[in-house]
Amino acid sequence: MAISSGVLAPDFSLPDENGTIRRLSDFRGKVVVLYFYPKDDTPGCTTEACNFRDDYSAYEKAGVVLLGVSPDSVESHAKFKQKYQLPFPLLADTEHKVCELYGVWGPKKFMGREYEGVLRTTFLIGPDGVIKKVFENVKPAQHSREVLEAF
């Protein structure tokens, strides 16, 4: 079960695609869209990331920080970011500690097989660090627009 709105977003530090450590608390004072996705360069995740990319100027205009998180490695993130010219940081949660902290790591099914993985979820975090809205069971194709409409 993901963390609910109205609570302080747990702080964390993770490396981005360049290996630079990013802390959620570094963005206090700004609205943050923290989106968790299962895997770099897969169809749904690519659709979601490219829609965020295509709408990025609207996020920038609104002063919103966009952060993507998945269990992929720093190297995988670097390739994914470069391949699709993604203008926002991708954070490597290789041990899925932050995914677990936010309650987005759990049982999934694919082609009849059950496994543990990232439940596609986005958190809209206010400048005060409090979660304003949680988007669960995200549909990649419509998600960026849905997030933009939420502020």
Image (cartoon, helix red, strand yellow):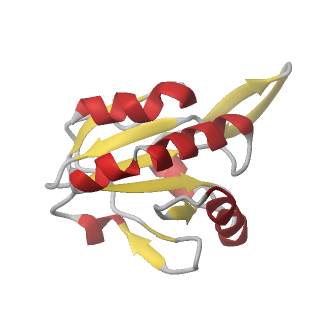
Q: What is the tally of numbered marks visible in this picture?
A: 0
Q: Position of residue 45 (x, y in %)?
A: 64, 41
Seen at 49% across and 50% down, the residue is 53
Q: From this view, report whether residue 126 is shown above or below residue 2.
A: below
Q: Position of residue 26 (x, y in %)?
A: 28, 72
Q: Position of residue 133 (x, y in %)?
A: 28, 33
Q: Is residue 88 left or right of residue 31?
A: right
Frontmost residue, 43 versus 8: 43
Residue projecting furthest to the top: 112
Residue projecting furthest to the right: 112
Q: Quadrant of residue 94?
A: bottom right
Q: Quadrant of residue 63?
A: bottom left
Q: From this view, report whether residue 18 is shown above or below residue 46.
A: below
Q: Is residue 12 left or right of residue 46?
A: left
Residue 138, can we see it? no
Quadrant where the image shows the C terminus: top left
Q: Position of residue 118 (x, y in %)?
A: 61, 41
Seen at 31% across and 36% down, the residue is 148
Seen at 53% across and 71% down, the residue is 16
Frontmost residue, 111 versus 53: 53
Q: Is residue 21 left or right of residue 79?
A: left
Frontmost residue, 142 versus 25: 142
Seen at 23% across and 53% down, the residue is 61
Q: From this view, report whether residue 29 is shown above or below residue 32.
A: below
Residue 129, can we see it? yes
